Amino acid sequence: MTVEFKDIRKAFADGTIALDRFNLAFDEGEFIVLLGPSGSGKTTACRILAGLEEPSGGSVWVGGRDITNLPPRHRRMSMVFQNYALYGHRSVYDNIAYPLKVRGAERSQIDGRVRETAAMLDISALLDKRPRQLSGGEAQRVAVARALVWQPEICLMDEPLSNLDALLRLQTRTELKRLHFELGTTFVFVTHDQEEAMTLGTRIAVLREGRLVQFDTPREIYRKPATRFVAEFIGRPAMNTIDGVIRDGQFRAGPLSVPAAGRPEGPVVMGARPEELAIADAQGPGAGLFTVDVVEQVEPDTLIFLKNGDTEIVVRALREAEELAPGAQVQVRFPEDGLHFFDPETGERIP
Amino acid sequence: MKEGWRIAAFAVVIAVLVMALAPYIWIVLTSFKTRLDALADTPVWLFTPTLDHYPEVFIGKGYLPLVWNSAIVAVSTTLLSLAVGAPAAYVFARHRFAGQEDLFFFFLTTRMAPPIAIVVPMFLLFTEIGITDHLIAVIIAHTSFTLSLVVWMMRGFFADIPREVDEAAQMDGLSRAGTFLRVLVPMAAPGLAASAILCFILSWNEFLYAFILVAFEGRTLTVGIPGLITPHGTLWGQVAAVAVVATLPIIAFTVLVQRHLVRGLTFGAVKG
């Protein structure tokens, strides 16, 4: 069973275009993360898959069937909302049981499923409570239980962790990953948090301005970002990008000169992840002189912010850089195999 | 100083209570007074009560069916207003469409014209279709003004329920109509209760429309009162007896659902 967005376009009444020629296809059992900044169309894509939003153009296919005009209740999908959207007038038990009840399950079966799902999410003790008596984390678990209790084919989650505080967000994240592993249900998870995306997704779809920019495994997205945007969006701190030019097999930007053999000449954007860079003892090939601006001790790492003219870079080093003080002059080495190049006009990756 | 404010506040409350309750206590007392006591130049506070007025007017004058008429009108008006008004309010709360705010305001404008200006054309219209002197005429007339109340109150209630709840219900397997009836209506129950009480009170107490649109068998309780003003004088004792009976359902209703009413009024109205 594959899920497929075909040339989806969505224009809202106020004229904003949320999605434009959006194409995406993935398989059953995956944990797909739709990642992008606000306004990238990720939530709209999720809502179109759910049937809560009608696309202005294009079609949605599941298992070889066009479901574009199918109402949400016939799609065999469930959804977890950012604000939980529990039924305030019903008990937790009834909230979880509701989709089974609506879908006409046997009463005996309902009770079993509800208790089983509640146990799985560790909320068995809450079944008699009312939604307003729950904490945010508890409410979110109830919402997840309600979404999973009837064993839908696809479980959609629209920023489900955004309303939780930091520690709880981490715990819930781990739990979702475990649930996905245990149930094998297809998950589609919308987030603007790249760290969530990297930890949860089997594959990540990065969206920007209504288009799919890259769709790949977290590892590939990190290691081979398809565009400068992805490179800067994924990873904290972001990838260093330096506008410059390639001439005589050297990347040059101001006084900086880094070997880039075999690359076509002309303007280019060079990228390097902070952990790929290293503080070097002495001048050498591929190194440049930078002035230390700020040193942040982010245990166990050290983040060193450096400047050279207009060029600003970050180096992530393991603790040894502690003696560096702002104003110090250091050599930063750019290893040739850790460099990325992007087209300065289109932002596309140059292989 | 603080003590002074407390006393002042207390005095204001007492003043309001006296103003609100004195006429009511007066009419309750009058309903048990003989004609002589009721018309005494100096109000009589201590008197030998008589229980004659109640049986006289309700059995003797045949006013008992009027209670029933009032009940039918008020209950029907309430149900009709909710059945039409609640879905309308839901649409106003959830959907965006051209002229929405104008249309919403239009509901309110139906209450701006003085009722007396509307009742005559309404009478002619109802005569034309042959429903004057039937309770249905009063029910329609009352619904014409309670409906706007329901729409205005309930819009706020539905707007307070997150849109995601509707969507969650649809994902859980309900149709749009099912979402409204099985999820939204139960969640807006306090608002519906508050609206229902207001509709009921307005319809039950209404005089003008009922007076013009029905006579004889179809009269409601309020319309029955002028019948007690006779050429030989007003039968104050019986008027008071009818008035007291007319207030009983309202009092009972309000006491029963007081909590809903307070919550409903403060909650829905602010957002409207």
Image: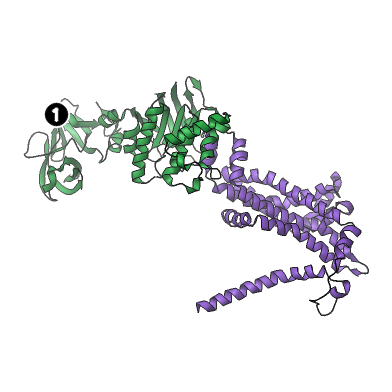
Residue B188 percent location from the top left of the image: 60, 47
Horizontal side of residue A280 vs A18, given as left or right = left
Residue A95 percent location from the top left of the image: 52, 39
Asked which secondary structure carries label 1, the reply is: loop
Figure quadrant of residue A36: top left
Say above or below: B272 vs B176. below
Residue ID at (48%, 23%): A61
Horizontal side of residue A119 vs B45, given as left or right = left
The chain under label 1 reads A
Residue ID at (72%, 56%): B201
The N terminus of chain A: image quadrant:
top left
Q: Residues within 10 Å of mark 1 (few under 14, many from 20)?
A: some
Horizontal side of residue A134 vs B179, given as left or right = left
Say above or below: B251 vs A150. below
Q: Which residue is mark 1?
A: A249
Q: Nearer the viewer, residue A342 or B118?
A: B118
Residue ID at (7%, 40%): A281
Amino acid type, label 1? Gly
Residue ID at (43%, 43%): A138
Q: Nearer the viewer, residue A249 or A77?
A: A77
Figure quadrant of residue A284: top left
Q: Can residue A185 be seen by looking at this rendering?
A: yes
Which chain wears green?
A
Say above or below: B232 vs A338. below
The C terminus of chain A: image quadrant:
top left
Residue B131 percent location from the top left of the image: 85, 46
Which chain wears purple?
B
